[in-house]
Image (spheres, rainbow, N blue to C red):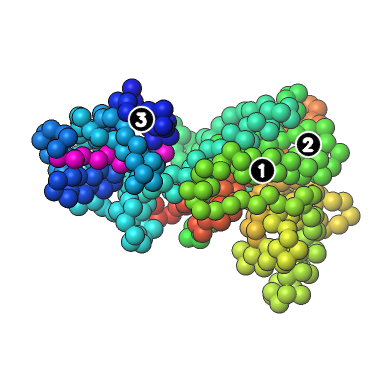
Amino acid sequence: MMYDSRFITANEYDKEVTVEGWAQEVRNLGGISFLILRDRYGLVQITAPKKKITPEVMQAITSLSRESVVRITGIVKASAQVKSGYEIIPSTVTVQSSAMTPLPMGVVDKVDVEAETRFNHRYMDLRKPEARAVFEIKSLVLRLIDEYMADNGFVEVFTPKLVASGAEGGSTLFKIDYFGKPAYLAQSPQLYKQMLMSTGMDRIFEIGPAFRAEPSDTARHVSEFISYDGEMAHIDSQTEVMAMIEGCMQYVISEVQTRGARSLEVLGTQVVLPKAPYPVISYEKAISMVQAAGFKIELGEDLGTEGEKMLGDLMAQDGHEMYWIAEYPEEAKPFYIMEKEGTPYSFSFDLDYKGQEISSGGQREHRYDRLVQRMEKKGLDPKSFEFYLNSFAYGMPSHGGWGIGVERLVQKMLGLNNIRETILFPRDRNRLVP
């Protein structure tokens, strides 16, 4: 029976088991050899006393190159000298795959490896338990989002990623040839999830890829990411949308603390549940706060990376890791965001986490005539969006929604320096392979 390191306990002592994994380390001391076998869940020590095993088994172990994949069958023996409390005395050794030498990078070596080397050899990098733990947490986060949304009556949907027009603007679109016609990779499911609000599917969410052709080389921007989007109808204000997001974030983070405990231990980090309810700061107040702290910015300008970081530091002084920034200038928001009549502002919000925006959303403009006016005000041709506008022409309820960058959420939750750490094979303007 095949075992992994999780399931070898005192119940298996003096029994035969089979294990398989990577040869992390081989030590030959003459009369005895040791092989440290690594699988997904931990380490297994294979102890090969020369007098107790066949010459063939000894030869197979001592000739192994590091990171070769090997299958071992043997007897489990209790051992006070081994951290796990046991060792395996091998009877057969099968080399499944020999690793070439030298390795392109070490897996457990105490040598810093440059980020470029790590991402160029991601298949090696992900053998590191701490690198894999990030993706175990990310997988858990996605599962928890699904749970929360289902419990709150949301239906999961999947919208097109090949689109005829962009939701956010033309400057960040990846253009492709679609059977001789121009098309684009979707920036977000924005237009489609709004269209669904006219169908009676009044609570929907989607978790899927999104693409932004942003020529940025920062630690927070990539060209392809996973977006968690939601839309809900029959709302009275954007506060209902904010409450839904806040509930989801609290659920996800609290469950990561418990269900993700093993992965957090591997990472050597802890996740703190933010104080709730999250404070709501108006855009105007946010600007005045960073101005008072010495940041040069004028009303109407975007906070930007440095402004967000400074605001995050100010909020942290009061113990707030998550907080809302609400009612941005309507000029800065897309056409589908509802204006706050009589003011230069809009019914919009961002959710910031430790000084970085992880979510944007707001109440949408559901009135056909005003939506067309908003488009024209933004310099867009309504005829280009006829497929979208038609869904507003025959009865559209009030609605609002959001988009959350899953990788940004995981990055900030785990305190990682670079968003690329949360993406298996990151894509940015300099990286298209592997």
Q: Amino acid at mark 3?
A: Tyr
Q: CA distance from mark 2 to mark 1?
A: 28 Å
Mark 1 in CB contact with mark 3 (< 8 angstroms): no
Lower position in the chain sequence, tag 2 or tag 1: 1
- Mark 2 touches mark 1? (CB < 8 Å): no
The amino acid type, in three-letter code, at marker 2 is His
Q: Label 2: few (<14), some or many (≥20) within 10 Å?
A: many
46 displayed left or right of 29: right
Q: Which residue is mark 3?
A: 13
Name the residue that disc number 2 marks. Answer: 399
Instruction: Indicate the secondary structure of the residue bearing disc 1.
Output: helix
Between disc 1 and disc 3, the foreground one is 3
Tag count in the figure? Answer: 3
* Mark 3 residue element: loop
Residue closer to the observer: 184 or 267: 267
Q: Residue at x 47, y 45 (%)?
A: 133
Which span of residues is magenta-colored?
A: 41-50
- Which residue in the rendered view is the most extreme toward the bottom? 294
Which residue is disc 1 drawn over? 254
Quadrant of the image for the C terminus?
top left
Instruction: Determine the main secondary structure of the stretch shown in magenta.
Output: strand
Q: Residue 125's x, y, as percent?
A: 36, 49
Q: Is residue 109 above or below residue 153?
A: below
